[in-house]
Amino acid sequence: MRLFSVAGMRKGALLAVASLWTSAAAAEPQHGIAMYGRPALPPDFVSLPYANPDAPKGGRIVFGEPGGFDSLNPWILKGSAPWGLGIHTVETLMGRSIDEPFTLYGLLAESVDTDDARSWVEFTLRPEARFSDGAPVTVEDVMWSYETLGTLGHPRYQTAWKKVARMEKTGERSIRFTFTEPDRELALLMGMRPILEKAQWEGKDFTESSLMVPTGSGPYVVESFEPGRFITFRRNPDYWGRDLPFNRGQNNFDEIRYDYFGDGDVTFQAFTAGEVTSFRESNAAKWTSRYDFPAVASGEVVKSEIPNQRPSGITGLVMNTRNPVFADWRVREAMIDAFNFEFINQTMNGGTDPRITSYFSNSPLGMDHAAATGKEAELLAPFAADLPPGTIEGYSLPVGDAAHALDRANLRQALKLFEEAGWTVQDGVMKDAAGTPFTFEILLASGATDSQTVVDIYVEALRNLGIVPTVAAVDSAQYKERTNTYAFDMAWYTRSLSLSPGNEQMLYWGSTGVTEPGSRNWMGMNSPAAEAMIRAMIESRSQENFIAATKALDRVLTAGRYVIPVWYSKVSRLAHSKKLHYPDRIPLYGDWPGFQPEVWWYEE
């Protein structure tokens, strides 16, 4: 088993964040740009530090995915596109290093320029940049892509686009964006939008889901696909950027394939049979107990644990406050009390994985659970009257009984909160004063076996409160449609969070998501305090203020009691063919987009 020490990682994460909060770079073209301070790599860097520049090219890697896909347009709200399409075939002006909190280096752009206030940013395209059909990547392609995505694309592109006052061509290969307001992250966000070929989309409706293969400039092209069954990417031998320093040691496989299966168990069976060559295991107990099949015993399959220093993010059951039954924080707290995490974790994981205690836990950005002080308290003070109890005073999740499915003390606390909110058990059923039963539906994606097991245990606990929810497991297309339109009461929810949170937080928690479809604000929260903390984060010019604002946001989210959190892991558990290899140097973010398959390689 390939293992890495995680001792001192929290300290390492603090140092990695702090080291980048230095004086701003001069206003002149640069090879890269960091959210704060200067990029860690010099202009003449050879490769990313976690890539092996001598990695051999060739071979294939096969992933298994539960569910399916019905679209090849991942940049709009409609349809369900395969995961790898936008990553392998399409590029951005700048590429992200996952060994720094938030730093970009030139990809399609050879340089980036901005002023000290970051009121504008300018990119200069590489003259050699080409789409896979041989056409040059032009400023016109960039401008069309940005305007189209910002006005017709998925809502995730629209927040930043609304802050662009002017987009202009400043030279044959140069483009400048001028911003409407102070927001230091915008200079980086403008480097991270996918660049599409304008000519391919002429006369076509960009907003409609389709199976047209997009033409990109990336290292791979789509070789073949069958909707809902598989998609295969073939490394482009004529890829224009194969010799860029940013790309050295990346994009090593000749073929990347994604096969789709009915559920996670079937996917695992395909892995044990050798049809899939890499498998991510999310369950700690299964990692210990079920990897005893012949390929592991013979050494043909290797178990690797990849550590990381990123925040825990949030995973669990989200309560949709658009449904009146979840509008009261006391009801949401009662639902959390009824969830015996300690027993569920013991049952599912052998108790090995820690609980998510806040959205940014496991990082220097996470809240303390005592009362807020200093800058945090100062930021939250104007909103004190409207914040749920515990936001400023301190809030911690209840601790259950690992030995018993029912934690009677927490259930009694849940009953008390329900009663305060106007709900009591009448003839064995939880009802309000009018006699209306407390009912709701839990929405799950079909094939999600672990979340289904968690819900099954939780439903049994709720019966003791006179609550019997219905559980609906739907296919991936229905799940996306229903969650995009918030047509659910409770659902399984996962949000990964970085060490440099910024504008995307408005998409996650902003009030526009209460009514506008496609946001990540599944809980339907409308919190002026949260939006104020996000604005403070993106306008901060010091480490101290940024961390204080993020911790304050973490308090608002956690004490809002919107999600019943489960566990997180400080390592990613990857089982894979022994012919698949990765560098010894693990990046700050660990197993994060940009790690597998990007820096992996095939070797007999």
Image (cartoon, rainbow, N blue to C red):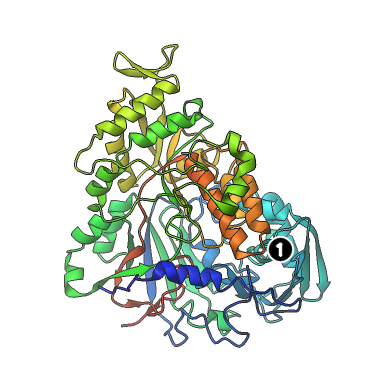
> Would you name the residue on which mark 1 appears?
198
Left or right? Give the position of 206 relative to 470. Answer: right
Q: What residue occupies the far top of the structure in this picture?
A: 434
Left or right? Give the position of 69 relative to 302. Answer: right
Give the vertical position of 521 relative to 580 (above or below): above
Residue 358 visible, this angle: yes
Disc 1: CA contacts within 10 A as few (<14), some (14-19) or many (>=20) = some
Residue 206 visible, this angle: no
**Residue 134 image point, x, y percent:** 65, 76
| Front-most of residues 459 and 314 | 314
Q: Name the quadrant containing residue 27.
A: bottom right
Q: Quadrant of the N terminus?
A: bottom left
Q: Residue at x 49, y 68 (%)?
A: 14
| Front-most of residues 233 and 403 | 403
Q: Name the quadrant containing residue 259.
A: bottom left
**Residue 588 image point, x, y percent:** 46, 71
Q: Residue at x 61, y 52 (%)?
A: 156
Q: Residue at x 59, y 71 (%)?
A: 103
Q: Residue at x 27, y 45 (%)?
A: 342
Q: Secondary structure at mark 1?
A: helix
Give the vertical position of 261 relative to 543 (above or below): above
Q: Quadrant of the C terminus?
A: bottom left
Left or right? Give the position of 139 relative to 310. Answer: right
**Residue 595 image point, x, y percent:** 45, 70
